[in-house]
Amino acid sequence: MLVFISPRPGCYRPGAQPNRLVSKQTQRIRNMKIITIANDKGGTAKTTTVLSLAGEVSQRGRHCLILDLDPQGQCAVALGLTQEPGAFNLLVNAAFDIHQWIRPTGRERLDIIPGNRTTATAQVVINAENRGMDVIRMLLNPLKREYDYIFLDTAPSVGGIQERAVYAADLVLIPSATEFMSTNGLGQSMALLAMLQKKHAWPGKLLGILPTFYDEQTSESKTTLEELQKTFGEAVLPPIHRATILREAPSEGKLVYELDPQHRATREYYALSEYLVRYS
């Protein structure tokens, strides 16, 4: 049976005003957590969620790293950086020092290991060599005293890299668009978690299912959200509303809170970051 962290009353307030003052409590010995954002279906806002969540958590005084395992390599581009074969080289050649592929984003406490289309080739190599499920976790192990959180962006597919990215995770977050066709990918993602738990003793937890592109003006969004809540109960987190700013920010190489600190989308991802930090 999958274990998930259920929302605590009063802690998850999507409308709350962001308060990003870094307190002395953040100065502590690191206990690194790996957060994998995954869904077998594309178009669910995985990359947007990785960027927004990592950005918000870093604003809370936590040191964060993004590892882009999606061959589209959009994380670097959305941060105003250049795509590089960092993920490919680390996955294929164990002799590489992981530090040589870490890039600063120009934002305090937020770094990235960029990827590009060569990551797809790494998937072929991993499958051909039948690498162990722990390959990505072992790859990140040298960073355990350097970062509080590592966020993994994954491709919308079932395969060697995605399975190992999920296995590496302490917590998995599954974005799911509030559209009828999106729930198919959600079912496959939940099945993957169950398989990894049963066959490989995956020790991680499900952080939650994150409804995205929510629009209360459409019956499709409302009905889909109701079905998600009916099927998965407390595992379903408060939704992220559809917003133009979520498309505009990456096109300008910025994070959402950098464009508009008070926008509803900013407040919603801020609330999600508060929940993650408080209960991870």
Image (cartoon, rainbow, N blue to C red):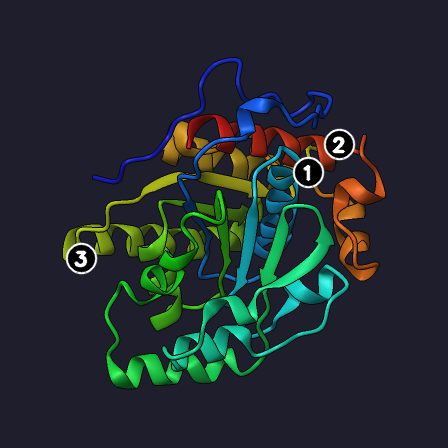
Q: Nearer the viewer, mark 1 or mark 2?
A: 2
x, y (%) of residue 261?
80, 34
x, y (%) of residue 39?
46, 56
Q: Nearer the viewer, mark 2 or mark 3?
A: 3
Q: Residue at x 65, y 44 (%)?
A: 55
Q: Residue at x 82, y 54 (%)?
A: 248
Q: Nearer the viewer, mark 1 or mark 3?
A: 3
Mark 1 crowdedness (10 Å alpha carbons): few <14, some 14-19, many ≥20: some
Mark 2 lies on a secondary structure that is helix
x, y (%) of residue 71?
55, 74
- CA–CA distance between discs 2 and 3? 40 Å
Between 39 and 127, the residue placed more toward the observer is 127
The type of residue carrying mark 3 is His
Residue 159 in view, yes or no: no
- CA–CA distance between discs 1 and 3? 36 Å
- Label 1 with label 2: CB-CB less than 8 Å: yes
Point out which mark residue 264 bears: 2
Q: Reading the chain from its start, which is encountered first: label 2 or label 3? A: 3
The residue that disc 3 covers is 200
The type of residue carrying mark 2 is Arg
Mark 3 lies on a secondary structure that is helix
The type of residue carrying mark 1 is His
Q: Quadrant of the C terminus?
A: top left
Q: Reading the chain from its start, which is encountered first: label 1 or label 3? A: 3
Between 3 and 76, the residue placed more toward the observer is 76
Point out which mark residue 117 bears: none
The residue that disc 1 covers is 241
Reply above or below: 140 against 60: below
Q: Residue at x 33, y 79 (%)?
A: 126
